[in-house]
Structures are given as C-alpha cells and as structure tokens.
Amino acid sequence: MSDRDSLLGRDLLSAADLSRDGVVEVLEVAEAFAEVSSRSVPKVPTLRGKLVATLFFEESTRTRLSFETAARRLSADVASLSVATSSVKKGESLKDTYRTIEALGADVLVVRHPSSGAPFQFTYWSDLDRATRVINAGDGCHEHPSQALLDAYSVRAAICAQRGVASEGSGASVFDGLRVLIVGDVRHSRVARSEIICYRALGAAVTLCAPGSLLPRDAEDWGVEVADDFEAALKEADVVSLLRLQLERGSGSSVPSLSEFTATHGLTERRAALLQPGAVVTHPGPMARGVEIASSVADAANALVTRQVANGVAVRMAILYLVLGGAPSLLGAASQ
Amino acid sequence: MTTRLLVQGGTLVFEAGPPSRGDVLVEDGRIAAVGEHLDAPPGAHVLDASGCAVGPGLVDLHAHLREPGDEEAETIESGARAAACGGFTAVVAMPNTMPACDSASVVTDVLARARGAACEVAPAGAITLGRRGEALAPMAEMAERGVVLFTDDGAGVQDGDLMRRGLEYAKGLGVTLAQHCEDTSLAAGGVMHEGKWSSTLGLRGQPAIAETAMVARDLGLVELTGARLHFLHLSVPASVRLVAAARERGLPVTCEVAPHHLTFDDSHCASYDPMWKVNPPLRPASMVDELMSLLRDGAFDAVATDHAPHPPEAKDQTFDDAPSGMLGLQHALPATVDALGGADGLDLVALFALLSRRPAAIARLRAGDERRGGHSAHGGDLSVGSDGNLCVVDLDCDHRVTARTLWSKSANSPYLRQRHSVAVRHTILRGTPTKLDGAVVQ
C-alpha cells in the first residue's frame, strides 16, 4: 500500500496525492456524510474542538462557503481569514503570513492563493513541526483537488442512479472506460488539471477540446487525447466538463471574443442535442451562461451543476475528516 | 619590504600548450619566476599546490553586487569575498543597482566602494538611462572612467532602433555592448521555461523563442553596424548556434553561459521553491545536455555567473512574486568542471580559457588593454612579469556546500547540500592571498 492509497492524516495539495484507492476512500466517506447533510439537524460532533482555518488570498464565495459549511457540520471551530494580496506589497513575506496563522493553532488550513504552488510552500515553511494539515482550495492555474473529487463523486452518483445501483460501495467501477471530455480554458484552469489527474486515476479516458490558444503547451504529455472536432468529441463523451474562461488570468487575449468562443466551443442547445443519452454535464461554477454553456443546457436534467454544489459539502466533510486522521472504519460511530 | 609567495607543486596551466608540473614565485605583486622546481627564497610564504591546477585568477563577466541600493542582499565587500572564495580576482559588476549605474558619478562611487575589496571590480554601465530602454545613457563619460562593457542587464533593450543607435554609438567609443536577450512581448511575464513542467505546475512559462528572437535581431544589428556585441547568459541551444555561426562568419560577437544553466533543469521548479526562479529560466534537461555539448565544442567564449543575491525575505514569497536570480560566484568553477565532463581528463586550458582568459579579454582586463579603471591585469599567461593574480584549484577534494560555507550576504544558492570534488584552494590577488588553504582571508 502506498501513501497515496489513503488521505488519512495527510495534506491534500494535489489530486496526484491520491491513487485510485485514495480517491475511492474519499468518495465512500463522502457517501456517509451525505446522509448527515440530509438530516433535519445536519450536524455531527466528529471534529468538536478542532480548528479549521480558511485562508483565502483570492476572492471566492462557493469554495469557501462549502468548506466552512462542511467544517461546521462536523462541529469544528472555523476561523475565516481573508488576506488581501496587497499585504505582500506592504512588506510582509508570505512565509510570515503563513507562520502567523499556523501559530494560532489551526488543525487544518484550507488555502486558496492566486499564485500556483503557495500551499506547497506552506508545507516546508512550517516551524511548528507540521502540526497543521494543509488543504489546497485552489492555487493559481495549478490545482483544485477538492473540486475534482466532488466532480468525480457527482458523476459517480449520477451514473449509478441511471443504472439503478447504489453508488455507495460501487468503488471506481463506473469510471472504467468512461469517456470524459474537458472543454474550454484548459490552459488557465486549475479544475482541469486536478480533474485530469483524478479521472485518469479512476480509470477514465480524458479528452481535451479547446481553442488552440487555450491549450497548455505539451498537454499531450498528460496522457490525454486532444480533440480538434468539438462536435465529434461530444458524440463520444459520457461526461462533459465545462470550464469558465479565466478572464482574470488573461484568457481574454487568447480568443478574439466571447461570442467567437461560444460559436466554436460553447455548449449550445444544438450541440447538447448531439450528446448520447445518459451523458452528463458538469461545471465547477461560477457559470457564464450564454458563453461556455447555454442557459437551457445548464438547467437541463443531465446538468449536475447544483448537485455538484450540494455534494461539495459532503466531499469536503470527508476530506476534513480524513486529513485530521479519522479512520473510515470508525465512521459509522462518528456519523451518529 | 618585499613580499614573496611561492606556489609549489601544482600543475601550471599556460595559455597554450600542455599544462606541466611546476612552481610560481610571486614577488611584490608580480610573477617573478616560473620553473619546474624553484627554491623558496628567504621569507617566502609557501603555498602548497600539490594535486592542484594553477592558473590565472578567474574573471566573472556577470555579477550583481547590489551596491549601491540593495545592501541587504549583497555589498561589494561581501560579494567580493564570495568571488575570492570562488577563485575570482576580478568581476564585472552589473549596473542594475539603485540608482542604476548610468552616469560617471555612480561609476566613480562603485569604484571607490570597491577599493580594498577581496577582488577587483569593473563596473558595467547601463546602455539606456535608468535601464528604462528609452534613451541612451552617457556612455562616453562612463567610458572615460574606465567602463568598457555596457548593458541594461535584467532587461533587454526592446526597442530595435534604440539598440541600433546604441551599437553605433558604442562602436565610435570603442566599447562593447552586452545584451540580456529577452523579447518581453514573447516572454509574456513567464516565470519559468514554457514546456511540460510549466503546464503541469500551472506557472506562466516563457518560451525559448523569447531569447532566440532577440539574439537573431541583434545579430542582424551587429551585421548592420559592425559594432561589437556580447550575449549574456545564453540558455537556449538555438541561440548559441546562431551566435557561434555568426562568429564563424567573422562578426564581432561573443557569448557566455551561466553555470546554473549547465547544471540544473526546469524540473526543480516542481518544488515551487523560488530559489529556482531565475531569468533566463532553467531549461529542460535535453537543453541542458545540449548546452554542455556546445560548451565542450567551444561554442561559448565564457562561463559567467549571473550571481544574483536576494535576501530570504525577498524569496519567501510565491514563485510568481519572488525576484529572479541565484548565487553563482562561489561554485561556478566546480559547476563548469562538471559541465566539461568532470575532473578526470579535464581540459584545463579550456577551463581557464572559459573562466579567466577569454572573459578577461572581453572585459579588456588583460595586460596590454588600455585601462582606466586602476585595476591590475587579469587572465594573463603564467610568465615572468605578469600581475600576480592566480587561482589554485584542488582537483581531488571532498567539499560539502552548506549555508555556513557561503560568503555572500544572501543564501539563495542552488549548490547547497551538493558535494564537490573540485574546489578552489588558494586565490591570489596582486600577490596577496584572498583565499588560503580553502579559507577566505579576512
């Protein structure tokens, strides 16, 4: 068994921190916590006395709210810190910012930063013997592992429901040979990077489709296919993962206009009709309706968008629970 | 009183011809005798050079000594000590200080601050005022004070017409321009090499063509103007081939490579440790290998350190926010030996050509060059009458690089934790040891 087979007591910095077994562990624990979320009082005492700090150097509503809701449902204390990136310009080094927060005694630090790699740096800047676990909640254009895990969870749940089987205990079986098509601004997307790693670990085949200027250099080295013909690729796909154009990271200059992007790579109603029956559409949000996805497509039954948000809380409960060392076998007791 | 120093039992590396075992006697700052076996005159300080190569003191074409303006990172005094520790007796100080070295008064200030330092310092001047790339700096008044190299290093001169006028103006003054080749529109703010690693790490990459495009433009400008041009820190094999071919055709161009580009590849960035952020960026392993073959084939005129100290607080930022640059003065020599294929069967003549004789010629620090900076002659032959600037290299030792062995004020060295079997044992500046038996003389 390798380290990557379990998230127990470890940091979650990259989707690559988890093997197929490691991902499945998160999905299974999340199933148990999803049940908690459906209760009239959706709260368990599992993490009572633990301090979960969310440290966001970049604007976020949904990811932060999702992690904080997850922490509260597990009865953890939550410290919520927003750090203007301008503090860098005020002269404090990122290392000092991190050590200050670590010294507050957080058990878990959930970090989002506009620069790739910042959460990785935290793990070697620690001066408290690494008592604080770090969860990457999105770093620059690099990764957003919890999003990839909740996407996988949502896809598994939807496909199992279609097949009339229970998703709990289904392992990675639905992903064997599953064809995932990731569309849009792959170059600037941390969701895409984490999804590629996570879906491939689960056994799915990943294809990318984007305007040439929004594909990263040497993307073929990631073990994915690159499709030029979007409509042909749609006909083949079991899962279509749409991405937002990261205008704040400079995607704007890589395509002539939003309307041209929609014309070539938007999931319009006409294109959505090309999908096979049973194919599902995911979007990490926030959606730009009318750009990468038509409004009617976003609201269709096979679009998982709002279910992704709801599942996000259960998946993040599982992540917090595991990184804090809670054993999956004790979960039955923990969720009472 | 006459001071005498006898360097005994080393392998003497002459400018040409095979190295041979012998002794060198330095008297009053000059080489007084060279022979197979010299008797120590009375009162002479004998330096053991057994197992060592003895050559001219090393000359660095490219050091950021940070003074004036960023003394937190480095001072001329601390940088010169690191240089002496690395075997250097002369370094060219880059002009990207605060203020920039773009006028005679800053040149005079740097020269005054360098008096008494552990190596000689030749300031380079800026090509454009404030290194802003907008208008030419007063090169004539700086040349008058001994400046022979001009560069906006840290940035390339983007405006092609301004670069052309700079070359024409420099040619008239008989000085040399040196270009940091980076087309900023193509580099597009990249913080590392664009390729497989930048894509995976989600870091903005700068493509190799950002360097090569400016090299190509400037070779055209050299052809147009006939002016001399030195290419700084070339990191892309295609750039080097262009320069080598132009030199072959007789164009007055030279080029250097930094030791870290011969040693480290871009996979190091995967740690996100900003210590590995440097500009030009570390390249893929395949390019590093090609640079090493180009070095062995004689495509480079010099290895130059691009020694770029930054204090810890500057590097304790994200990869995006941290400044570029790493230390180089102390360990350029072992890195160059490695790139040449290691100490076994090492071409010592090539080693001292790359690290001393040819850079000294480019910076016009050799005997016979017209000099106005008040320094001695560097990169000379081991012959009677030459200035006593020497570097004695132990070719079989076991040296471990640790933070405590660094002499720079900063510690951003990529060589930390490395073990070296080659190290500088003695450095001699004008007949006086600045490093003795492996220890910097304070």
Image (spheres, rainbow, N blue to C red):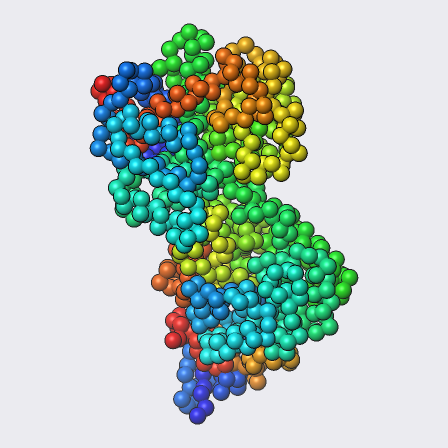
Percent coordinates x, y for residue B116 in the rendering = 46, 79
Residue extending furthest right?
B224
Percent coordinates x, y for residue B338 in the rendering = 51, 58
Task: Name which residue lies at 57% across and 20% down.
Answer: A294
Task: Name which residue lies at 44% across and 39% down.
Answer: A58
Residue extending furthest top?
A164
The answer, for residue A75, to whether it is visible in the render is yes
Seen in the picture, residue B284 relative to B399 is either above or below; the reply is above
Percent coordinates x, y for residue B278 in the rendering = 51, 53
Percent coordinates x, y for residue A262 in the rendering = 62, 25
The answer, for residue B361, to whether it is visible in the render is no
User: Tag count in the figure?
Assistant: 0
Residue extending furthest bottom?
B1
Q: In this view, does B437 lie to the left or right of A226?
A: left
Task: Name which residue lies at 66% across and 69% down.
Answer: B176
Q: In this view, does B209 lie to the left or right of A285?
A: right
Q: Nearer the viewer, residue B30 or A66?
A: A66
Q: In this view, does B183 lie to the left or right of B202?
A: right
Seen in the picture, residue A222 relative to A102 is either above or below; the reply is above
The quadrant where residue A59 appears = top left
Q: Quadrant of the N terminus of chain A?
A: top left
Q: Which of A226 and B50 is in front in this view?
A: A226
Q: In which quarter of the image is the C terminus of chain A?
A: top left
The quadrant where residue B382 appears = bottom right
Task: Name which residue lies at 46% across and 41% down.
Answer: A114
